[in-house]
Image (spheres, rainbow, N blue to C red):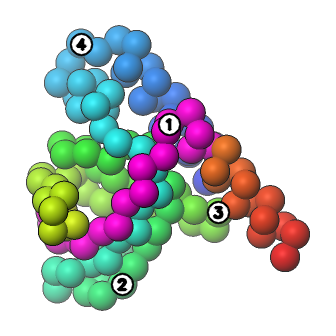
Amino acid sequence: MYQKTLLLDLIGAKKECKEVTKTPLQKDISNSKSGYLKIEKVSKNYGYLLYGERFEGYTPIFGENLAAYLINTINHFHTSVIKSIDWKKHTFKTMNSKYSFEFKEIELNKLLEAFEDEVKSLRTM
């Protein structure tokens, strides 16, 4: 399953950055949040998602100066680099777009487990 491989790669990259934080990018990755992210595009520019469209999934890396990768059991999506996050208004701006978001923080060590639990629950339906 490609989505699981992508999730594992991003989790591994974040763990590696936590061990060896030398560059500004490694610091941003190391300090980023992980969890379950629901986004809705609120800007009217063209892109993969159009105004009002939504996407949700697990994200090991969510923070400023980084692209957000959302990975669910069926598909994945990534934004362009996030320029700013307004945690009070639940919005973020990327290089190209603006999104509203809901975020449920999940410890990095439990992220894969949550993803696999969702996969199992879908198989038993």
In the rendered structure, which amino acid carries the disc numbered 2?
A: Glu
The residue pinned by badge 2 equals 53
First in residue order: circle 3 vs circle 4: 4
Closer to the camera in the image, 116 or 110: 110
In the rendered structure, which amino acid carries the disc numbered 3?
A: Thr
Q: Secondary structure at mark 2?
A: loop
Quick check: 84 above or below 54? Answer: above
First in residue order: circle 3 vs circle 1: 3
**Residue at position x 57%, y 62% in the image:** 72
**Residue at position x 23%, y 32% in the image:** 28
The residue pinned by badge 4 equals 22
Q: Secondary structure at mark 3?
A: loop
Image location of residue 62, percent across then percent down: 32, 47
The residue pinned by badge 3 equals 73
First in residue order: circle 2 vs circle 1: 2
Real-space CA distance between mark 1 and mark 4, rounded to the nearest whole angstrom: 20 Å
Real-space CA distance between mark 2 and mark 3, rounded to the nearest whole angstrom: 18 Å
In the rendered structure, which amino acid carries the disc numbered 4?
A: Lys
Image location of residue 23, percent across then percent down: 20, 18
Extent of the magenta region:
93-112
Q: Is residue 67 magenta?
A: no
Real-space CA distance between mark 2 and mark 4, rounded to the nearest whole angstrom: 37 Å
**In which image quadrant can residue 101 be found?**
bottom left
Real-space CA distance between mark 3 and mark 4, rounded to the nearest whole angstrom: 33 Å
Name the disc covering residue 17, or none: none
Real-space CA distance between mark 2 and mark 1, rounded to the nearest whole angstrom: 27 Å
Quick check: 20 above or below 96? Answer: above
Name the disc covering residue 108, or none: 1
